[in-house]
């Protein structure tokens, strides 16, 4: 894939997204409150949180799909309130659920998406369809959930935007296509693009994202590099002692644990790293940074 040609080696990376004190309320219902974070050019940025955490509200505010109450959103150095059209030219957005005309053929939907942008995306769309193994002659109504996802991916990527925003992109994709999807993301990012990935699949975050923001109950809990967030001294202990099976997280000094176990009847013991889910649940449940 050819470079997008916007950034030179050694050049300071620009802030593609700058959100400051974003607040949006839905009457008595929770929205988001004073959310602030930045996404730099070249990031694969994970956006995490349980249902109702405020991820969709944040994304919809960024895209101009809803009006937020206060704060600011700048994308590519442009104000989202006054320069939305210019911003959207540079964005490829894939919602978690995309609806298409069921009687239209795949190729017609893809071309329609390109025509709306007044772009000739035929060559890029052809490459994407080949990589994702899509039959473009099929009607949308004949497609499985996974294949409809592929159509959404092509529509979001074919114009080679500077920023991709994906909302739960891999649900419905088989493992082979999930791997191919992330291979495409890495290629576009290497060529100069940026990706914001809203997902519930924690393994995807650990494997592909370099930075992550964690939302909880409409508030931002943490923004950090994935490597820092997943670094922990806690250990998962699985043990059979005195005839009883136990399974717990241990955050103390292992030497103290060994002293505690001395003289006990230990039938089996396994000490391992806690799962990624357990690490992130700390932020989801406790709301601690």
Image (tube, rainbow, N blue to C red):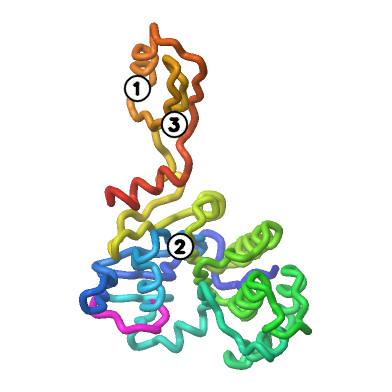
Residue 130 relative to residue 116: left or right: right
Q: Looking at the rendered structure, which numbered label has been put on residue 12?
A: 2
Q: Nearer the viewer, mark 3 or mark 2?
A: 3
- Say what secondary structure mark 1 lies in: loop
> In this rendering, which labeled residue sits more in front, label 2 or label 1?
1
Pointer 3: what residue? Answer: 236
Task: Please identify the dominant SS of the magenta region.
Answer: loop
Magenta range is 62-70
- Front residue (pair 36, 4): 36
Query: At 47% from the left edge and 64% from the top edge, which residue is drawn?
Result: 198
Query: Label 1 near label 2: C-beta < 8 Å?
Result: no
Q: Do residues under tags 3 and 2 come within 8 Å of each other at their CB atoms? A: no
In terms of depth relative to the viewer, which is nearer, 164 or 82? 164
Q: Secondary structure at mark 2?
A: loop
- Which of marks 3 and 1 precedes in the sequence? 3
The Cα–Cα distance between marks 2 and 1, rounded to whole angstroms, is 42 Å
């Amino acid at each position: 894939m050819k470079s997008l040609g916007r950034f030179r080696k050694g050049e300071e990376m620009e802030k593609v997204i700058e959100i400051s004190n974003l607040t949006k309320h839905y009457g008595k219902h929770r929205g988001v409150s004073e959310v602030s974070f930045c996404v730099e050019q070249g990031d694969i940025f994970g956006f995490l949180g349980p249902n109702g955490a405020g991820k969709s509200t944040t994304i919809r505010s960024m895209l101009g799909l809803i009006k937020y109450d206060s704060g600011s959103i700048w994308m590519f150095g442009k104000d989202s309130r006054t320069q939305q059209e210019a911003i959207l030219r540079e964005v490829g957005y894939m919602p978690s659920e995309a609806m298409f005309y069921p009687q239209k053929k795949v190729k017609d939907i893809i071309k329609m998406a390109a025509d709306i942008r007044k772009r000739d995306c035929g060559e890029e769309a052809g490459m994407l369809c080949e990589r994702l193994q899509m039959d473009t002659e099929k009607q949308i109504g004949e497609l499985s959930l996974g294949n409809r996802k592929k159509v959404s991916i092509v529509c979001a990527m074919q114009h080679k935007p500077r920023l991709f925003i994906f909302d739960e992109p891999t649900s419905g994709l088989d493992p082979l296509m999930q791997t191919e999807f992330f291979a495409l993301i890495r290629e576009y990012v290497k060529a100069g693009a940026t990706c914001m990935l809203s997902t519930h699949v924690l393994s995807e975050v650990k494997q592909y994202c370099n930075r992550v923001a964690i939302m909880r109950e409409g508030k931002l809990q943490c923004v950090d590099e994935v490597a820092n967030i997943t670094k922990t001294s806690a250990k998962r202990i699985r043990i059979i002692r005195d005839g009883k099976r136990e399974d717990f997280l241990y955050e103390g000094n292992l030497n103290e644990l060994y002293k505690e176990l001395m003289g006990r009847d230990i039938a089996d013991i396994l000490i391992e790293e806690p799962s990624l889910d357990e690490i992130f649940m700390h932020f989801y449940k406790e709301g601690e940074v």
